[in-house]
Image (cartoon, rainbow, N blue to C red):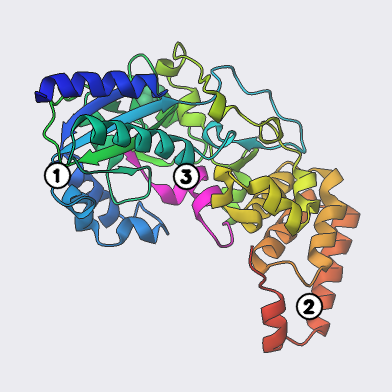
């Protein structure tokens, strides 16, 4: 079958499988590769060591699939276009992308079905589906495949679908018909995303410094969160959507209605005090099949403590004091609980802090105790 006909039918099948937009780009070094190297050189990847590991791999899709010729890029809209309900003092905000089932599994399953279709239509064809699981600059290939432009907030924006979209790639050794790349940025003179960022995470248009980004600190960072960032979380307990929420291109974008990605009510505006009190076993059950698993129980409890402290939530004092008292509490969570109690600053909060300081002074730190303080998340 001719490349043009196969490409047309492939796109039709992708839409039938529940993907919202599909484009095809040649498997060459992505145009944005030099920008990625500059981003790394400036230290903007913060502690994301996986982004710095063998950067040259991201120039060569051949490393992901031997003999690759084409990159099929698919996007899938997620989340609701309605404004989030303003959370109360004890509730947190979760980035829209993480409120439903883990998109890696949903999107990858569809791309694998598309691959099966392709193998049936073009016997002998080889392919590999990747969704954040291989060193691929997905947004660059999406732009090359005509699916939108990489905007000033560094997200890919599709003129009809907006930027609340998941991206996944299907690499194949087949020669296909390639789409026109999206050459133009439609951001114009707008700077809303840059102006709205509460932590000034944009070093400039098209340049995100993860060292200042709430999403980085609440999802990727495993250690103690600096005081300056903790004070600026503004309710975000996992990720942040502000630079997308303010974008005019998302105003008329369709809401994600995919049943497999349906937001779970428990993640819409979760009760963060319940997070502090939840057992490890219950966390395990709740996080199964969720993208929140990336931060793990330890990261989420840490974030909950910081949000509650930043909001001076008096009702959090006892659960925070309990965390400080427990020898099972990880030092990272302990540091967050201490910071939160200090912010709340009521007599009971300060008393709990003083008790914890006394307990620590009286307990000799032995190697065994250090192990006890550091359970797996
Ligand atoms: S808010 Fe404005 S500058 Fe930022 S991504 Fe949207 S259109 Fe571009």
Residue 147 showing in the rendered view: no
In the rendered structure, the answer to whether residue 169 lies left or right of residue 182 reads right
What residue is disc 3 on?
A: 213
Quadrant in the rendering for residue 250: top left
Residue at horizontal 78%, vertical 52%? Answer: 278
Residue nearer the viewer, 364 or 367: 367
| Circle 2 crowding by C-alpha within 10 Å: few under 14, some 14–19, many from 20 | few
Look at 15% across and 19% down and name the residue there: 5
Left or right of 311 on screen, residue 104: left
User: The N terminus appears in which quarter of the rendering?
Assistant: top left
- Where disc 2 sits, the SS reads helix
Q: State whether residue 176 is above or below residue 278.
A: above
First reached walking from the N terminus: tag 1 or tag 2 = 1
Name the image quarter holding the C terminus.
Answer: bottom right
Whether label 1 touches label 2, CB < 8 Å: no
| Number of numbered tags placed on the structure image | 3
In space, the residues marked 1 and 3 are separated at their CA atoms by 28 Å
Compare residues 227 and 334 and report the one nearer the observer.
334
At x 74% / y 45%, what residue is drawn?
Answer: 308
* Residue 218 part of the magenta segment: yes
Among numbered discs 3 and 2, the one appearing first in the sequence: 3
Residue designated by label 2: 360
Over which residues does the magenta segment extend? Answer: 206-225
């Amino acid at each position: 079958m001719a490349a043009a006909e196969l490409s047309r039918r492939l796109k039709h099948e992708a839409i039938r499988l529940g993907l919202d937009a599909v484009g095809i780009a040649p498997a060459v070094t992505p145009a944005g590769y030099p920008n990625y190297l500059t981003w790394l050189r400036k230290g903007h990847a913060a502690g994301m060591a996986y982004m710095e590991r063998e950067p040259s791999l991201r120039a060569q899709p051949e490393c992901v699939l031997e003999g690759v010729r084409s990159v099929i890029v698919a996007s899938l809209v997620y989340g609701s276009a309605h404004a989030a309900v303003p959370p109360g003092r004890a509730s947190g905000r979760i980035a829209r992308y993480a409120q439903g089932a883990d998109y890696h599994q949903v999107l990858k399953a569809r791309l694998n079905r598309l691959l099966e279709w392709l193998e049936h239509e073009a016997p002998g064809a080889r392919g590999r589906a990747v969704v954040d699981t291989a060193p691929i600059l997905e947004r660059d290939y999406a732009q090359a495949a005509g699916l939108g432009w990489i905007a000033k907030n560094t997200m890919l924006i599709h003129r009809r679908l907006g930027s609340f979209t998941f991206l996944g790639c299907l690499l194949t050794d087949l020669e296909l018909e390639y789409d026109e790349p999206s050459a133009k940025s439609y951001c114009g003179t707008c700077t809303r995303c840059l102006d709205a960022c509460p932590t000034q995470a944009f070093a400039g248009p098209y340049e995100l410094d993860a060292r200042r980004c709430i999403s980085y600190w609440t999802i990727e960072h495993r250690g103690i969160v600096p005081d300056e960032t903790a004070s600026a979380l503004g309710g975000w307990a996992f990720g942040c959507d502000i630079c997308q929420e303010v974008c005019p291109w998302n105003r008329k974008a369709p809401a994600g209605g995919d049943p497999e990605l349906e937001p779970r009510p428990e993640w819409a505006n979760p009760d963060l005090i319940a997070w502090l009190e939840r057992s490890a076993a219950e966390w395990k059950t709740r996080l199964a099949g969720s993208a929140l698993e990336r931060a793990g129980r330890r990261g989420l409890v840490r974030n909950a403590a910081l949000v509650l402290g930043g909001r001076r939530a008096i009702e959090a004092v006892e659960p925070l004091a309990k965390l400080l008292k427990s020898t099972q509490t990880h030092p990272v969570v302990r540091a967050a609980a201490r910071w939160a109690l200090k912010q709340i600053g009521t007599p009971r909060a300060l008393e709990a802090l003083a008790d914890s300081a006394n307990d620590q002074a009286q307990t000799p730190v032995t190697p065994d105790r250090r192990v006890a303080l550091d359970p797996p998340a």
